[in-house]
Image (spheres, grey):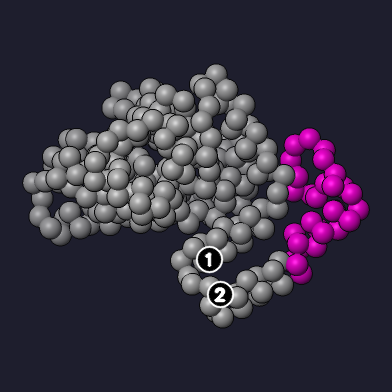
Amino acid sequence: MEGQIHNGDLLCTIDKNGVATLALNQGDKFNAFDNHIIQLLITELNRLTHAANVRCLVLRGNGKHFSAGADLNWMRSMAAKDYEENLADASQLAELMHLLDSFPHPTIVYTHGCAFGGALGLICCCDIAIADIDAVFSLSEVKLGLVPATIGPYVCRAIGARNTRRYVLTAERFDAQDALKIGLVHFVTAPSTIDEKLSQVIGQILANSPAAMTQAKALIHQCSEQPLDKELIAYTSELIANIRVSEQGQEGLNAFLEKRDPVWHIGPKNAG
């Protein structure tokens, strides 16, 4: 499955190590998205979810901006449609956010230029976020008389209710350093060093057990959405027991004890 798939407006590549990259490719439109782009993303995420050789996903935008959020022409057309059509449209965006948030492998997003509205939802749905030092962010929906509804749960979970209140209600623009402070992004880097930073993070991921990372993501979701009760405690006990006796669990433990790299390790040799 290694190679490239070109949909024109969305590019997908998968390298020999199983690193998939989805690149928004409408730079002339600031990578603003409409129902067409949303459906392309849904289709590719579904395909990559079931691809046997994918180990992580990178999401980025080509051109000067990551994404300006919703396309204005699309928003104008939806304003003229009825409730049922708007509900179907909103459900499509909600499906995209859920697919990205629940993607079974590690996800990395790189944002540069502007990231407005729904684009912040994409960032919040990814596991690791890297921002260009000059990136600008905004939850601008209320300026248009709208609400960041479908992305709201993911934004609130990523930056907390207090920060969400501020940035949703003011609709102010904020920079990469503020995004770092509130936990929207994990790293801020200069354009000249983004490839180095991406390679570093990808290298860390490729050194880990694919099965363990998938289970870890599921565990994190479970922990963040459920109170610490007997059911969750039982789930965590069963999870580690299953992992320990699994093929990759056995390989990882044996590799550690034998001071060698496990079979899934890609990158510099680093036993122990």
Residue lying at the far right in this picture: please name it: 258
For mark 2, what is the residue? Answer: 232
Secondary structure category for the residue under label 2: helix
- Relative to 141, is 50 above or below? below
- Please indicate, yes or no, whether residue 16 appears anywhere in the rendered image: no
Left or right: 149 with respect to 254?
left
Residue 53 x %, y %: 63, 48
Magenta-span inclusion, residue 253: yes
Q: Please report the bounds of the magenta region as a residue range.
A: 244-272
Q: Nearer the viewer, residue 213 or 152?
A: 152
Magenta-span inclusion, residue 73: no
Left or right: 226 with respect to 272?
left
* Residue density around tag 1, few if under 14, some if 14–19, many if 20 or more, within 10 Å: some
Q: Nearer the viewer, residue 146 or 84?
A: 146
Left or right: 213 with respect to 44?
right
Residue 42 x %, y %: 39, 49
Name the residue: 18% across, 47% down: 146
Name the residue: 49% across, 72% down: 227
Q: Amino acid at mark 2?
A: Leu
Q: CA distance from mark 2 to mark 1?
A: 7 Å
Q: Amino acid at mark 1?
A: Cys
For mark 1, what is the residue? Answer: 223
Residue 148 x %, y %: 26, 49
- Please indicate, yes or no, whether residue 24 appears anywhere in the rendered image: yes
Name the residue: 40% across, 44% down: 122
Tag 2–tag 1 contact (CB < 8 Å): yes
Q: Nearer the viewer, residue 251 or 120?
A: 120
Residue 265 x %, y %: 75, 45
The answer to which image quadrant residue 247 occupies is bottom right
Secondary structure category for the residue under label 1: helix
Identify the mark nearer the N-term, 2 or 1.
1
Q: Which mark is residue 191?
A: none
